[in-house]
Image (cartoon, grey):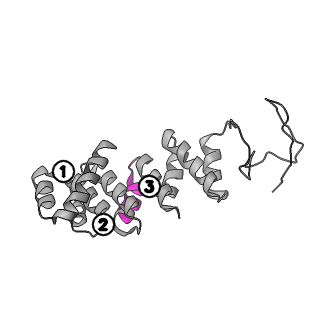
Amino acid sequence: KIRKDILINKREQNFSFDIASKPEFVDLDPDKILVGQVIDNKKAADYLYQYKNVPTYYNRIEAIKFATKNKSNESQLILLAGLEDQQDDLRTLSIKGIELNNDAVKSLLNVAKNDKNTTARAAAIIKLASTGDASYKELMQESTKNQSYNVIAAGIVGLTKFSADEADKALSTLDQDTKDHVTVLIKKFNNQK
């Protein structure tokens, strides 16, 4: 690990350094104190390295944000790793951006069933429902009986994909207070698609 201090005193500047070999990663602003726009010309492989080896929240979220817009294999690996991130908002962002393949579905099922954060669970439930695969219908039905408004709403939104009548029935069985909260969330989830 090499750290260099530089002085930025012009509107545009280029820097070069003599080093023994090509660096694996360059972080122009490791302390995140620069005011201004930093343009990195990183590729997906650089962001994958960044996500796995530079543990700061900022570096992880930047890698995930890049990966949600880039459909390369490396980007999907970032999002797959992001499904297990310690931060629930990064897990949720990864869920929304990941393409569904066997590895992703396995991880999404785990999040949908076991994540302690109900926002991440709800996002995983909705993502799984978007496949239209009837094997997830039971997960949707179970979700409508959860204690979390987010999970209940996601279950109802997901159940709508399989049977609007069952979704309406699940909503009608809720007490009025729960129904009031869940209805707002259902609208929110439907508008996010």
Q: Earlier in the sequence, mark 2 or mark 3?
A: 3
- Could you tell me which secondary element the residue under label 2 belongs to? loop
Which residue in the structure is indicated by mark 2? 148
What type is the residue that disc 3 sits on? Thr
Q: Which label lies toward us, 2 or 1?
A: 2
Which residue in the structure is indicated by mark 3? 92
What type is the residue that disc 1 sits on? Thr
| Left or right, residue 140 beside residue 104 | left
**Residue at horizontal 37%, vertical 69%?**
114
Distance (Cα) linking label 3 and label 1: 21 Å
User: Is residue 29 or residue 149 the one in the foreground?
Assistant: 149
**Residue at horizontal 30%, vertical 49%?**
189
**Residue at horizontal 21%, vertical 56%?**
156
Q: Residues within 10 Å of mark 3 (few under 14, many from 20)?
A: many
Residue 153's x, y, as percent? Answer: 26, 57
Q: Earlier in the sequence, mark 3 or mark 1?
A: 3
- Could you tell me which secondary element the residue under label 1 belongs to? helix
Q: Is residue 101 magenta?
A: yes
Q: Is residue 44 magenta?
A: no
Do we see residue 81 in this rendering? yes
Distance (Cα) linking label 2 and label 1: 18 Å
- Could you tell me which secondary element the residue under label 3 belongs to? helix
Which residue in the structure is indicated by mark 1? 160
Distance (Cα) linking label 2 and label 3: 16 Å
